Image: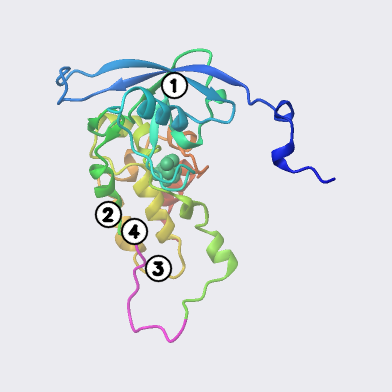
Amino acid sequence: MTATIDEAPASSVPEIPSFEVTLKVRRYSPESAHGDEAYWDEFTVTAHGTDRVLDALHKIKWEHDGSVTFRRSCAHGICGSDAMRINGRNRLACKTLLKDVNPDKPIIVEPIKGLPVIKDLVVDMEPFFASYREIMPFLVTTGNQPSGERLQSAEQRERFDDTTKCILCAACTSSCPVFWTDGQYFGPAAIVNAHRFIFDSRDEGAEQRLEILNDKEGVWRCRTTFNCSEACPRGIEVTKAIQEVKRAMITRAF
Ligand code: SF4
Ligand code: FES
């Protein structure tokens, strides 16, 4: 006789081990009794080995305190909306396993730095996107309409492959000490996205973008601290891209 799932004895189903984890969350809620003062809240939840920081935040919000506020959308490292500081390092909450950030101690969760906090872990991303818009993140072409596709060789495509992976999470820009001290700096993410088009053989707007980034708040503010490369959840070589843009500015070779 063939066994069905319903007939399997309950004892044969392995129990998924669980553990308790505490998250210490930086809160900011001007409309609450705390006013303009930021404060810390601790929450302890039950988690499993495959749970991520985002899962723990969901548990907190759904089971402990519905007012805890954070952004997330895809939950799979694609939309870039849940960048936050976790144990002092910028990461995506949906790509950070609890077991990888020492769940034996309270896990410190804070908003990313350098952008105004709106509530709890949610920051105002507008200054970040304003810099992104300034570098013209779209294909610029002149002349007549092409009669067919704009062809490109595999080698030409490879030239900017790394910087196409950006998901605009701001983990790089908000880990940059220059950006913290001077919110005017374009920041790594804007330069990465300029790189994506400057080195695209089909694009004709490189000179304009280089001129924009030659500003006193442009690429020359970069101090090559590598924080941005370490923070990038997509593994983009951010510092290398910035160096290539600097070199293109001098050599005009792209
Ligand atoms: S370069 Fe990396 S860290 Fe910076 S915005 Fe893009 S994906 Fe995020
Ligand atoms: S929720 Fe989309 S990247 Fe994490």
Where does residue 39 sit, x and y in percent of width and height? Answer: 26, 16
Q: Secondary structure at mark 3?
A: loop
Residue 137's disc is 4
The answer to whether 49 appears left or right of 124 in the picture is right
Q: Residues within 10 Å of mark 1 (few under 14, many from 20)?
A: some
Q: Earlier in the sequence, mark 3 or mark 2?
A: 2
**Quarter that holds the C terminus:** bottom left
Q: Alpha carbon of mark 3 to alpha carbon of mark 4: how far?
A: 11 Å
The answer to whether 14 appears left or right of 174 in the picture is right
Judge by depth and name the residue closer to the eye, 99 or 213. Answer: 99
Q: Tell me if residue 14 can be seen.
A: yes
**What's the residue type where badge 1 is placed?**
Asn
Q: Which residue is mark 1?
A: 87
Q: Alpha carbon of mark 1 to alpha carbon of mark 3: how far?
A: 41 Å
Q: Which residue is mark 2?
A: 133
Closer to the observer: label 1 or label 3? 1
Q: Secondary structure at mark 2?
A: helix
Residue at the outermost front position: 1
Judge by depth and name the residue closer to the eye, 129 or 53. Answer: 53
Residue at the outermost top position: 105
Q: Which residue is mark 3?
A: 203
Indicate which quadrant contains ligand 1. Answer: top left
Q: Residues within 10 Å of mark 2 (few under 14, many from 20)?
A: some
**What's the residue type where badge 4 is placed?**
Pro
